[in-house]
Image: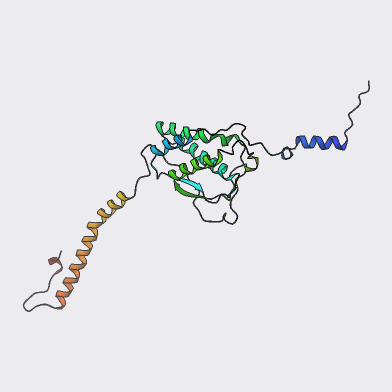
C-alpha cells in the first residue's frame, strides 16, 4: 500500500507559523465584563487607615508615566504589591484589615503584567498617602473598568527623562503591628547626651583649672606661694 504524504504549501506553512509563534498570538486580554470594584472600598480602606499609624513608611513610584488609561491601573498594581508585603509582617488583626483592602484591588493580578521596568524609581512616603492614593485611583477607575480594555497597560512605563534621578529604592517593610513603628531616635540621642555631659564638664573644669594655675604662676601676689598642680583638682 502506498501512503501519500501531505503536500505543504507556503500558505500552510505560514499559517502554522502564526499559530505556533508566542509573539504573534496577540496581546493578552485585560478587560472586565463585570466590575470588580466594590461599592464599599472606601469604608474598607478607611478601617485600615484608622487602625494604622499614619506615618508608617512605605515607598511609592515617583516617575510613573501620566497615562490617561493606564495610570490608575498601574498605581493599583503597585499598591496591591505593598498590601501583599505588609500582610507577611502584620499581626492577626492588622492582617485581616490588610487582606480586606488587598481583596478590593486584587483584580489587577488577573492581568499578565510584565516585570517592573528598571527605570522605575521609588521614594519614601507615609502609608496614609498610599491608602489615600489607592482610594482615589479606585474612584477614577470605577466608571471605566467595564468599558475599557487594559491590554496595552501590561507594562508599566516611566516618564521620559526621569529614569536617572537619584531616588530611594523600595525597601522591605519591617514588623508591622497595630501601634508599632520603627524605634524613635530621640531617646537614644538623649541617652548619649546624658552620658557625655559629665565627661564634657570634667574636661571643661580641667581646662579652666589649668588656665587659672598658669595665670597664678605668672603673676604671684606678694607673699603668696606658687600654686602646685595638686591644689586645683
The C terminus: image quadrant: bottom left
Q: Position of residue 41 (x, y in %)?
A: 48, 35
Q: How many marks?
A: 0
Q: Which residue is painted at 56% across and 43% down in the image?
A: 72
What residue do we see at 50% from left, 53% from top? 167
Res 96 quadrant in image: top left
Colouring scheme, one of rainbow, by chain, secondary structure, one colour: rainbow
Q: Residue at x 14, y 66 (%)?
A: 232
Q: Quadrant of the N terminus?
A: top right
Considering every residue shown, the one lying at the far left of the view is 223
**Residue 50 lies in what quarter of the image?**
top left
Residue at the farthest front position: 143
Occupied quadrant, residue 227: bottom left
Q: Work out whether residue 154 or residue 171 is closer to the camera in this orientation and state it.
A: 154
- Whether residue 172 can be seen here: no
Whether residue 200 is situated above or below residue 190 in the rendered picture: below
- Which residue is situated farthest in the top direction here? 1
Relative placement, left or right, of 42 versus 155 is left
In the displayed structure, 74 sits above or below 5; it is below
Query: Is 156 left, or right, of 203 in this rendering?
Result: right
Whole-percent x, y for residue 177 in the image: 39, 37
Is residue 190 at least partly visible in the picture?
A: yes
Picture coordinates of residue 22, whole percent (x, y): 72, 37
Q: In percent of the image, x 17 and y 75: which residue is there?
A: 215
Q: Nearer the viewer, residue 16 or 158?
A: 158
Question: Would residue 11 appear left or right of 39 to someone viewing this image?
Answer: right
The image shows residue 145 at horizontal and vertical percentages of 59, 37
Amino acid at each position: 500500500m502506498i501512503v501519500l504524504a501531505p503536500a505543504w504549501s507556503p500558505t500552510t506553512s505560514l499559517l502554522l507559523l502564526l499559530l505556533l509563534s508566542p509573539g504573534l498570538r496577540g496581546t493578552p486580554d485585560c478587560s472586565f465584563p463585570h466590575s470588580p470594584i466594590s461599592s464599599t472600598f472606601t469604608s474598607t480602606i478607611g478601617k485600615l487607615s484608622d487602625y494604622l499609624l499614619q506615618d508608617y513608611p512605605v515607598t511609592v513610584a515617583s516617575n510613573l508615566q501620566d497615562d490617561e488609561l493606564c495610570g490608575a491601573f498601574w498605581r493599583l498594581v503597585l499598591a496591591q504589591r505593598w498590601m501583599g508585603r505588609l500582610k507577611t509582617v502584620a499581626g492577626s488583626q492588622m492582617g485581616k484589615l490588610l487582606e480586606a483592602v488587598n481583596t478590593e484591588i486584587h483584580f489587577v493580578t488577573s492581568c499578565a503584567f510584565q516585570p517592573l521596568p528598571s527605570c522605575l524609581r521609588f521614594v519614601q512616603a507615609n502609608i496614609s498617602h498610599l491608602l489615600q492614593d489607592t482610594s482615589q485611583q479606585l474612584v477614577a477607575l470605577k466608571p471605566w473598568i467595564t468599558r475599557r480594555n487594559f491590554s496595552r497597560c501590561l507594562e508599566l512605563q516611566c516618564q521620559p527623562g526621569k529614569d536617572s534621578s537619584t531616588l530611594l529604592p523600595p525597601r522591605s517593610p519591617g514588623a508591622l503591628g497595630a501601634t508599632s513603628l520603627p524605634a524613635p531616635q530621640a531617646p537614644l540621642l538623649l541617652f548619649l547626651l546624658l552620658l557625655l555631659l559629665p565627661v564634657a564638664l570634667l574636661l571643661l573644669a580641667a581646662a579652666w583649672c589649668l588656665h587659672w594655675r598658669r595665670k597664678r604662676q605668672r603673676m604671684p601676689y606678694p607673699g603668696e606661694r606658687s600654686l602646685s598642680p595638686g591644689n586645683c583638682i
